[in-house]
Image (tube, rainbow, N blue to C red):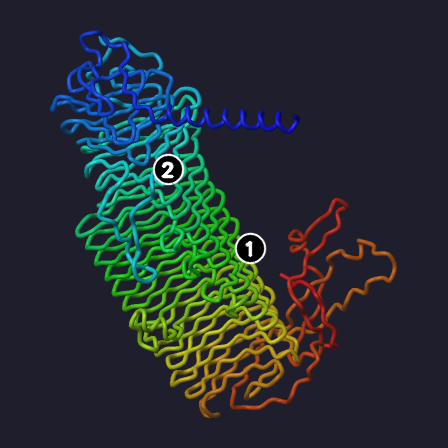
Amino acid sequence: MIARNCLGKWLLAVSGIILSDLLNVAKVAIAEVIPDETLSAQERTQVSGNPNFQIDGGARRGNNLFHSFSQFSISGGGSAYFNNAGDIQNIFSRISGGSVSNIDGLIRANGKANLFLLNPNGIVFGPNARLDIGGSFVGTTANTINFADGFQFSATAPQAAPLLTMSVPIGLQFGQNPKTIRVQGNGYDLSVPGAVGSPTIKGNTVTGLVVLPGNTLALVGGNIDIQGGTLTAEQGRIELGSVGTGQQVELSLVSQSLALSYQGIQNFQDIQFSQKALADSSGGGSIQVWGERVSLTDGSQMLVQNQGEQQGGSINVNARSLDMSSTTLDGRLRSGLDSQTLGSGTGADIAIATQQLIVRDGAAVSARSFGTGNSGRAIVNASDSVQVLGFSPLDLLRNSNIASVALGSGDAGSVSISTRQLTIRDGGGIAVSTLGDGEGGEVTVNAFDSIEIVGARNAFLSSNISAATLGNGNAGKIAIDTGKLVLRDGGTVNSSTVASGNAGSAVINATVSIDIDGKGFDSGLPSSVRVSAPLPDRELQQAYRLSPVPQGSSGDIIINTGRLRVTNGASVEASNQGTGDAGTLQVKANSIVLDRGGAITSATASGRGGNIDLQVKNLLLMQRGSQITTSAFGSGNGGNISIRTSSLVAVPKENSDISANSANARGGNVDINTNTLLGFQFRSENTSLSDITATGKDSAFNGIVQINVQDITPNNGLVELPAVVLDRSTLIANRCIARKSPQSRLIITANGSLPTLPDDLLNSPFPTYEIESVPAQNQSDALTDEGGFIYTEPDGIYPMSNGEVLLGRLCH
């Protein structure tokens, strides 16, 4: 009995649910286009037919026609035909009842009239929704349309006909909690045949909401939800705005299309693109999106594709956050913002203004040229952060990126990033490249706090900021300004050529520090700042018809920073494995630390070796197999090395080398100016110890090693610290390190010989320092604590003539 009662209750509950669902479906499916009675009887909207509705009448004021409905819904296969006079310019339709407009059929109008559909309760466009109008379309959940003469056409407080106006519309006024606009569909009909980097091919059938070329398609409401829907306004404008309570969006007429402005709006709502949704304004059109949180998933795109001589256009996204992720299920089409030019016209620019930008799982911000026209620019202003993360799990070659690429003969546009914090991880990239005769654009990154580039567990990809050429055009320049730059686990800043074009330069200003550490997990490639001309692999040669040996020259590296650390096999490198010259490498820093195989190198296979210029204010420390080298392995001469530093220190037995060698020509020169030189030995060839070398193909072609060391001896003696509890008075700064003979120097030539030096760090073969009292005028530069004692911070390591090493500060 109990079981029977439970079964009965369960059947009753299920029946209730089913009945409720059926009622909801029936409610949505009902086609209702019903006029209200707010207009005068002579001008009232007249509706006939069902499910194909014909709409006549309405109140005409000049070239404006006003309609007022209590309900406005169209079922699948149905239509609503506005039978307006041909000279009408604007049709304003309001829904004053309390129901959502469900539109799953066709909306038609005569002539070139713009159509405004105003329903504060919400609008849903189904998969079969279509537009057949000659002008622009505005679908909105605003309460009111404002006019230039002060009149308001309101759906929540509908006016009678005598108050209607012939003036032009200037704005949309929203009330409390603006409702959602939803566009449903089966996704776009796009494809990308061939290899990565092919242009997008459009299908023969255009579906979804479409306006004629040159017009505007605008959806302005609360949340905007594009679920597989497609929006098309070729050569025109797509305007998507998601605004909050009480806001007003301004309207204006631009040429034959409508433009919207969001100036002064304080709060926005969300916009979602999902299930292969598309906003397409190809042919030089524009897409403008304003929202709080804007997201694109499942391969959804905003696209401007220009063909022939079609020019320019733009994609503009303004949001507190913009999140783009993933690809289509086959992995071939990315979520993101895509500008393409296939002819001689210029590609559309992409501009993003946000607090936070996230590009992940194979999504992209991409400006590409496939013809003779130049690709557009990608401009990102993110006040908080930019994150470029990962790659598509369905296609390991489709990494997340922000890029401008020229695949034809046009030039690549620039990529500009301005933010507080930039993070690139797991194969993500920021890139500009050219594959033909066009020039590469510049990559400019301003991240006033930090930049972190971390490698991927993917042997095919590295996380990077890059500029590259695979053709005759030259690669662009990389310019980075930040507080801290971190490259690890294979992350790189890289400008390269694998063809006849030259690699660009890399200029990095990091006010606090640069840390470059380690190698890639699977690739084994080092974390690096690199300008290079590597040998292309066989697959790359075949794909882009490349010569097996690049002919272009490497670019230059210029680094300015507070502290540079290069560790665990990482490198700062200017190299050329082709026939061109290696680039030069210049670093200005307060300190440089090279450790565990960290290297600063310039190398060439055939051309001239590049020069290395290091200007280090305090300490240059080399440990455990670290390297500063210029090498030439072909017929070119070795590059020169110039080092200016307060202290140059290595551990003798750890095989850290400074070398300017050439295998088949003249070795380069090594010029060192320092106050302290510890741990190095000049030798005629490299050994397992810490060496300074400048070898050529034989002794007659050796380079010159010139070392200038300041001559200093003890004077006032050392301050002996007590063995008792530290008394801070013993730290009074009454001693400093002074030079004895500022003009002394030592010149060593590579074809001479010197006695073998002891391999003890504390026994320097070079002149040492003296200790003097702190000059009275310099005590004002020291630090003073609350008790009045004066302290100074050390600025280097100074060996005394008795073999002791003192950590101290030079007298000034």
Q: Which residue is mark 1?
A: 512
State the quadrant of the N terminus: top right
Query: In the orientation shown, which residue stands out farthest toward the right?
Result: 724
Task: Check disc 1 and report its element: helix, strand or loop.
Answer: strand
In the picture, measured across the screen, residue 174 lies left or right of residue 35, that is: right
Relative to the observer, which residue lies in front, 153 or 607? 153
Residue visible at 69% across and 84% down in the picture: 758
Residue at the far front in the pictured view? 1
Q: Are marks 2 and 1 in contact (CB under 8 Å)?
A: no
Residue kind at label 1, given as amino acid type: Val
Q: Residues within 10 Å of mark 1 (few under 14, many from 20)?
A: some
Seen at 48% across and 55% down, the residue is 390
Q: Residue at x 25, y 34 (%)?
A: 130
Q: Which amino acid is tagged 2?
A: Ile
Find disc 2 in the rendering and name its residue.
Answer: 226
Task: Examine the image and state in which quarter residue 467 appears.
Answer: bottom left
Q: Name the one closer to the observer, 671 or 713.
A: 671
